Image (cartoon, rainbow, N blue to C red):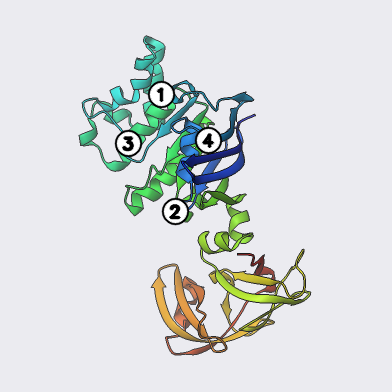
Amino acid sequence: MGLKLRDVAKRYGMQEVLHPLSLAVGSGEFLTLLGPSGSGKTTVLRLIGGFTQASSGNILFDGQDITQLPANRRPFNTVFQDYALFPHMTVLQNAGYGPLVQRRQGDDTRKLIDETLDIVGLSALRDRYPAQLSGGQKQRVALARAIICQPKVILLDEPLAALDATLRRQMQVFLKQIQRRIDTTFVFVTHDQDEAITMSDRIVVMNLGRIEQVGTPKDLYFSPRTRFVAGFFGDNNLISGTVSDEGHVDSSLGTLPVAGLSGLIRGEEVLVAIRPESLRLGKGAASIQAVVTDSMFGGALTKLLLRPTRDQSITLDLRLSGLDRGSAPSPGDSVSVTYDPADAVVIADRG
């Protein structure tokens, strides 16, 4: 049955930091809470873990109401950003702290600790102390300590934030592999969109204490439903306009062909969202004249910033693949830009 939040809210005095929200987390799912600072994602994690008490609503796990259950009685474990390792204990002792507290000893427990260290790849470092470990190794110890007691849910509060870019990418792959191997529900908090895309089965995008949208990485990337999601989740060119007729939106850049306007009426204000990689140089059904203002080489992709001639207050972002970099225009060049109408997402602009 998994984990469920029903109309859960959090207030401090008169300030409502988390508006009533409902959310279901499936058993064995890797769910990510994504949002900027102050969006409420860490508050949700702390409510689930029992570190913060809800002001209203209910939290259920496998059909049981655990809203008032203290943190140490919930079948969950948490991995924090700062690792929280005991400096005077070895890797082996840190990993085995949970069974020690539970007074579990004997050959079965020693075997469990050995297997857990093997899962996180730290068997060879079992006798080292935290000061002798790298950041990634410390994070693996913290993960071993979290999974060794076989919790039903593991909560991860921005655990990769302190790592450098290369190690962070390695740990993203590692965490997802571990989650699949032990088949345990992970609830992961991050503000990094790329991290969320890489690791998640589903993503909850949060803003100002509310859920903006829930979906798979592909759902959110290709079908954002709100202005915030379109602007926050990956890059998007956002163009304001009004619905003119079936399949078209009038904007300051001209009439833009779009694939679908279901549920929208003529004259309604909308946003047209087009991913940078969906724009291409050349003419087509939707052609926009522009001037290149900047060109930035980024390895696999070259980023072009364009200023449309019809509305110079707008900047368009276009990405060229590495195969096209030899023909990339230079700043000052005039270009035509087009896109496939099926790649344009129309969002009701309701604030």
Disc 3 from disc 1: Cα separation: 21 Å
Q: Amino acid at mark 3?
A: Tyr
Percent coordinates x, y for residue 275 in the rendering: 57, 68
Instruction: State which tag comes first along the sequence, 4 or 2.
Output: 4
| Residue with the mark numbered 3 | 83
- The one nearer the camera, 45 or 116, is 45
Mark 1 or mark 4: name the one nearer the start of the chain.
Answer: 4
Tell me how far mark 1 sits from mark 2, CA to CA: 31 Å
**Quarter in which the C terminus is drawn:** bottom right
* Residue shown at the point (60%, 43%) measured from the top left: 21
User: Of helix, strand and loop, which one carries label 3?
Assistant: loop
What amino acid does circle 2 point to?
Answer: Asp
Residue bearing mark 2: 192
Q: Nearer the viewer, mark 4 or mark 2?
A: 4
Query: Can you tell which mark lies on residue 278?
Result: none
State which quarter of the image contains the N terminus.
top right
Closer to the camera: disc 1 or disc 2? 2
CA distance for labels 3 and 4: 29 Å
Q: Position of residue 300 (x, y in %)?
A: 44, 67
Mark 2: which secondary structure? loop
202 sits left or right of 247 in the view = left
Tell me the residue that label 4 is attached to: 55
| Element assignment for label 4 | loop
Judging by the rendered image, the residue that carries numbered circle 1 is 115
